Image: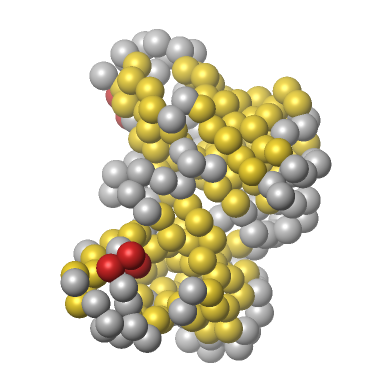
């Protein structure tokens, strides 16, 4: 069966510091991968998605970036965090060409 | 653009009450529709889905019917339990180019009291 992992589970970072969140999927090949942010009172917002290694599509302009160095690994990064980057970050995957997405446990990021 | 509208709540019910959470959508095309559930501090779990008009998705006593004529996908359960307390998200997907992010409603916080 397929499983999706995210780490760290929680993170507290100062403004201006770098960020790296990791997501990995097991038990499947060539998944579509997604990063969402859930901010208080704003629902879930799609940040990035990827259909393959090195292929990243950005949905919202921001100071975040994403990379997919391996088939089942998806990384969310920032060079300098802003207060507004605080939120709950969710990674998701779907089989190629399928619309159902399966979510990881999330990372709670607090920027102080 | 695409959008999903749902009641935000909180919705507070007594155990064994009937539940309806309304969801309506706007989409350019024929989307697939989903309900996800989020328990405190956790990620989202797929609850049910429907891919075409008049389809009924069901799981764990929850049901929702894809109504194209009213662009709705209301979630129902006949008898709720305390363990159903969570945030429920309605979402749609329009696959394009082999991948698509889900468009979510803002979520409905459901509280079930014993």
Q: Nearer the viewer, residue B33 or A105?
A: A105
Left or right side of A62 for A22: right
Report the coloring of the rendering.
secondary structure
- When the figure is inspected, residue A4 is found, relative to residue B21, above or below; the finding is above
Q: Nearer the viewer, residue A97 or A65?
A: A97
Seen at 54% across and 42% down, the residue is A104
- Name the outermost residue toward the right: A29
In percent of width and height, residue A81 lies at 39, 18
Q: Nearer the viewer, residue B106 or B20?
A: B20
Seen at 56% across and 55% down, the residue is B102
Left or right side of B84 for A112: left
In percent of width and height, residue A80 lies at 43, 14
Seen at 65% across and 25% down, the residue is A67
Left or right side of B44 for A28: right
- Name the outermost residue toward the top: A17
Q: Is residue A86 visible?
A: yes
In percent of width and height, residue B20 lies at 34, 80
- When the figure is inspected, residue B10 is found, relative to residue B40, above or below; the finding is below
Quarter occupied by the C terminus of chain A: top left
- When the figure is inspected, residue A5 is found, relative to residue B58, above or below; the finding is above
Q: Is residue B1 visible?
A: no
In percent of width and height, residue B34 lies at 54, 67
Give residue A25's quadrant in the image: top right
């Amino acid at each position: 069966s397929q499983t999706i992992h995210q780490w760290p589970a929680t993170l507290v970072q100062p403004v201006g510091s770098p960020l790296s969140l990791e997501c990995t999927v097991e038990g499947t090949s060539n998944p579509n991968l997604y990063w969402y942010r859930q901010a208080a009172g704003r629902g879930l917002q799609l940040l990035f998605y990827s259909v393959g290694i090195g292929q990243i599509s950005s949905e919202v302009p921001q100071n975040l970036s994403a990379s997919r160095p391996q088939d089942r690994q998806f990384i969310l990064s920032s060079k300098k965090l802003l207060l507004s980057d605080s939120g709950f970050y969710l990674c998701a995957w779907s089989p190629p060409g399928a619309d159902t997405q399966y979510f990881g446990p999330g990372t709670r990021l607090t920027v102080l | 653009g695409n959008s999903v509208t749902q009641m935000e709540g909180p919705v507070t019910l007594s155990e064994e009450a009937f539940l309806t959470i309304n969801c309506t959508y706007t989409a350019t095309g024929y989307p697939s529709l989903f309900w996800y559930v989020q328990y405190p501090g956790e990620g989202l779990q797929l609850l049910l889905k429907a891919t075409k008009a008049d389809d009924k998705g069901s799981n764990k006593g929850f049901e929702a019917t894809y109504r194209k004529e009213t662009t709705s996908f209301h979630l129902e359960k006949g008898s709720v339990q305390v363990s159903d307390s969570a945030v429920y998200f309605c979402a749609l997907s329009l696959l394009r180019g082999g991948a698509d992010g889900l468009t979510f409603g803002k979520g409905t916080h459901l509280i079930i009291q014993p």
